[in-house]
Image (spheres, rainbow, N blue to C red):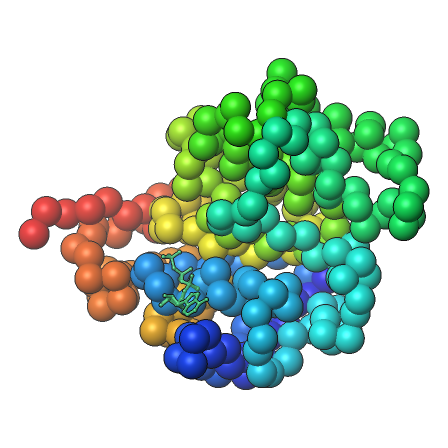
Amino acid sequence: MTVRVSGLDVALGGRPVLKGVSLEVGAGSWTAVIGPNGAGKSTLLRAVLGLVPSRGEITVEGVDLGTLKPRQRARLVAYAPQNPNLPVGMTVFDYTLLGRSPYIPHLGRESARDRAITAEVLDRLDLTAFAGRPLDHLSGGERQRVVLARALAQQTRVLLLDEPTTALDIGHQQQVMELIDRLRLSDGLTVVTTIHDLTLAGQYADRLVLVSGGRVAAAGEPARVLTRPVVEEHFDARVRVTPGAGGRPVLSLERP
Ligand SMILES: Nc1ncnc2c1ncn2[C@@H]1O[C@H](COP(=O)(O)OP(=O)(O)OP(=O)(O)O)[C@@H](O)[C@H]1O
């Protein structure tokens, strides 16, 4: 499903945070939103979800998201926030099962299928052993995988993931990114992630959108966006950029 954002303006606390942001994410593709701290990346995802007031147009497959009821929207777009509120004492299984809420009738109970989907997602994320454990008894990386599990249990065609790998060790980073990519290819998911690891972004995403100072500063294939001058200008970092597998850029820090 194609996601289109056009002329998006967001102001928070009376201050403009996003200014005229436009982007198009093709159906079944992966776009990574990159940019320095405070650039407006999370705000962009939250605006698509309708979680912050915005001006401009946001459509999924031509449907204006603003016209949908929350349940309808939740069947179309799943979101894994960077810092979610995790109910104290709730188990990993029950939290992941919340992803099935848009399919459970009001005042109804989850079906055997909802529970089976939840169990399958936990298995795919290496979390089965944690199913009965309260969320507050997990490590940061385990919790991050559970938040992703809840989003995957929602079984939407569009996935918005805010920093899905920040708390993960290198093995789990790879496992999560590969899983997202497999789901994208097998189920035709459209994926938008914010991500700070620029090499990781360039390895998995078809397109990068660089947000800086609330505007889109560059967009395109990873090798076109991740150049030394661009990284230096927008991140104030000295890096070496070398072509990796498939010409995708690999960044390493250089000491000034
Ligand atoms: N509720 C709010 N009220 C006022 N300003 C806000 C609010 N939430 C975020 N901001 C500001 O909006 C700007 C963009 O924040 P956002 O979280 O979108 O940045 P980001 O690019 O995701 O940053 P990071 O990489 O640090 O996570 C920041 O300057 C932030 O301080």
Is 170 placed above or below 183 here? above
**Count of numbered circles in the view:** 0
Instruction: Residue at 67% x, 40% y: name it.
Output: 150
Q: Position of residue 171 (x, y in %)?
A: 44, 26
Q: Nearer the viewer, residue 170 or 84?
A: 84
Is 64 placed above or below 242 here? below
Is 93 placed above or below 248 here? above
Q: Position of residue 3 (x, y in %)?
A: 65, 67
Instruction: Residue at 39% x, 79% y: name it.
Output: 15
Q: Quadrant of ligand 1?
A: bottom left
Q: Position of residue 235 (x, y in %)?
A: 25, 61
Q: Is residue 172 visible?
A: no
Instruction: Residue at 79% x, 32% y: name it.
Output: 117
| 251 left or right, relative to 143 | left
User: In the picture, which quadrant includes the N terminus?
Assistant: bottom right
Q: Is residue 50 visible?
A: yes
Q: Position of residue 229 (x, y in %)?
A: 22, 66
Identity of the residue furthest to the top in this view: 129
Q: Nearer the viewer, residue 175 or 166?
A: 166
Q: Nearer the viewer, residue 95 or 204?
A: 95
The image quadrant of residue 50 is: bottom right
Identity of the residue furthest to the left in this view: 256
Instruction: Residue at 81% x, 50% y: name it.
Output: 102
| 51 left or right, relative to 234 | right
Is 177 placed above or below 239 here? above
Q: Nearer the viewer, residue 3 or 107?
A: 107
